[in-house]
Image (cartoon, grey):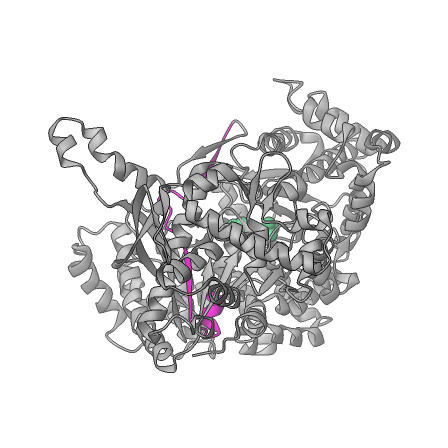
Amino acid sequence: MRHDEREKPGTVAASGSAGPDMKDHILDVLRHRVGKDVHSATPHDWFTATVLALRDKVIDNWMDSTHRTYEAAGKRVYYLSLEFLIGRLLRDALSNMGLTREMEKALRTYGFDLSAIEDLEPDAALGNGGLGRLAACFMESLASLDIPAYGYGIRYVNGMFRQRLDDGWQVELPETWLSHGNPWEFDRRESAYRIGFGGEVVDKGDRVEWIPAEQVEASAVDTPVVGWRGKRVNTLRLWTASALDPIRLDAFNAGDYAGALAEEVRAETLVRVLYPADSSPAGQELRLRQEYFFTSASIQDIVRRHVQTYGAIETLPDKAAIQLNDTHPAVAVAELMRLLVDVHGLDFNEAWDLTRRTVAYTNHTLLPEALESWPLPLFERLLPRHMQIIYAINSRVLREARKAGADDRAIAAISLIDEAGERRVRMANLAFVGAHSVNGVAALHTELMKSTVFSDLHGLYPTRINNKTNGVTPRRWLQQCNPGLTGVITDAIGPAFLDDAEKLADLNALAGDAALGERIAEVKRANKVALASYLRQTMGLRLDPDALFDVHIKRIHEYKRQLLNLVETVALYDQIRSHPERDWVPRVKIFGGKAASSYHNAKLIIKLASDIARRVNADPSVGGLLKVVFMPDYNVSKAERIIPAADLSEQISTAGMEASGTGNMKFAMNGALTIGTLDGANVEIKDRVGDDNIVIFGLTAEEVAEKRAGGYNPRAVIEKSRELQQAVSAIATGVFSPDDPSRYAGLMGGIYDHDWFMVAADFDAYHAAQRRVDRLWEDQAAWREKAIRNIANVGWFSSDRTIGEYARDIWGVGSA
Ligand SMILES: *Cc1c(COP(=O)(O)O)cnc(C)c1O
């Protein structure tokens, strides 16, 4: 990383260097708060002192932001999410506060390099993938746009698992991100709430009361979220759990130590791990308990704050906007109703009106098997009062539907209870009816919501569904991860794009400028050299930085089609070996991503990537023309390293299955060309960068649906394509797994038999598209121009634009 390229003149934030000298302040913190002097301090102590010294500056802006909100009596946004994939915070906070240079200088006087200190920060992996990262980008944009907001989630002690590869197999290890403490956070024990489970509902005549059988305490742990230029600091409030009675002394004194602590262990289990699956319900009772735990604590906190500030609950929708990030917090609808009716004594109709005006819901998936639902007996046992409320809501909604002319089929689809087979509570339907806005996350996805999963609910409430195409924060995903490129852009068009990413469009006028193309190519090469050197140090690989870096990083899932890429890699490998005389474009194929621990095929795909890598990388007959890498433990920090070094971005999901994608946006912002299907936000990226600057291939969502409806014969497709047939049969017969020749027979058999994810159907088109990429790469001047067109035209995918749309269309909030 070239630190001298950070914070060019004109980019430094105004909040800068007030207060005591940073250098002295760090030393003071090290001494008085870490309790070490320069002789005894470990590098971790220096990291802690660095964060605490910075945090002192952040706190002033934090308190100022809070006071401004109270004084303006402004509406606040509450973003409820089971996941916040925030990654590291030090570089982000320094850069947004405009203190990077000052901190660098300060640490240098003690002989430390800031980037080495930054690398000591654990990567906070409180999420699985895109949905959690979206929540983190949104928190940063909310603060940058000066919108008062709280993020609410769970402070997982272990979070997402750490991935190790043992002989190519994924091994899941606990992520111990809190093992050195967390200098960012503040314990807010005064903000604690009781969360009940089970028990019974007692009729008290004029009202009912829920008497839970069990209770745990949720208490708040706050992390400041700094906006760009330090304008506003918002709060990420994560809940931690403890028993009301941490220890039963009678049991302890009688020698039953385990029994004495059982309740505490039970409570702590709630915040232990994040279920490593975001596209299928984990099904475990613990997951439902986690969802209710953090949702109830958050809703109680919101209601308490409102009543304390405004004295009455009736104005809640004017002062609070609650956004549900997917259905994980959907029980918020029933919890808010419960508080309004049972605690605040409102009648049902009024409570229902307030709830719907306050709550909004974001949908992230169309896959029917991934729509959350809970077995009714489980739900009723754990949350008996909420079950009653859901029945009451349901009868109201179904009455409305009947009145509007819904037939039995439509009624069954709209109902909050799935009556087919084992009865289940449908969380997406609950969120839909309890919200005034239901949004999709890309234009295509939103249209599919209307025509598929929610078609009957959409018929009943035709104005409720709206689109908010996702975005990513350009601070983390351009400025901080790619200071070299940021510097070149600043030199070319000035610093205005730092405050408004859509100003990147000024680069369009310079797209044909050879000198600019060259400077951008130099930065890309430097980023590739840095990644290659990292991979040499960590994996012992030698990669040619002049090869095309072709990158496929995201959660491992069959719909994301790492398998299509791997089969194509094998086909390319075959062809290079058969025709070594052709002038092949040297490629490095980089894969990374975690597989849900119970997802057998995804884990097998990781092993296949490793098996292919081992064979290809050791084969002298492909020379340096092809290398395959599977980078273990993909996370936010790794993404920040890899994306600036990518030439080609693989966004090749089966059309209709990726709701939006946000990885696609990060790559384009860093000048990679996309090879992709017409899926999710790829469609809108294509519209903005132009058909000539993206490589699109394959079936459309509509064509996929048609094929699935009948008449698709993958076996016939495979037999017609020589390349595909050879590659699939090589994998199936153990060419890459001589130690276990039938390892991939089943995986390949799936392609022959049903090919649900259309690997065979799209193979020829994908293979041809890759050869188009080769031809484009051979004309480096033209490639550079395309890279510039990508950077210039994806400013719209800034999460500032997305949040601006939520603020205007859904929340009705402004700044203050
Ligand atoms: C952006 C991001 C994702 C989402 O990537 P997709 O390609 O959209 O699936 C997942 N994980 C991490 C660490 C990310 O930074």
Of the pair 10 and 762, the residue shown nearer to us: 762
Residue 325: percent from left, percent from top: 52, 56
Horizontal arrangement in the rendering, residue 286 relative to residue 576 (left or right):
left
Residue 176, compared with residue 59, is above or below; it is: above
Residue 664 appears in the rendering: no
- Quadrant of the drawing holding the C terminus: bottom left
Q: Nearer the viewer, residue 453 or 545?
A: 453
Numbered range of the magenta stretch:
140-166
Q: Residue at x 70, y 54 (%)?
A: 456
| Residue furthest out toward the bottom | 72
The residue sitting at 33% across, 60% down in the picture is: 222
Q: Can I make out residue 212 in this image?
A: yes
Residue situated in front as seen by the camera: 232 or 445: 445
Q: Is residue 738 left or right of residue 230?
A: right
The verdict on residue 141 being magenta is yes
The x, y position of residue 262, in whole percent, is: 26, 34
Identity of the residue drawn at 31% across and 56% down: 221
Is residue 760 inside the magenta stretch? no
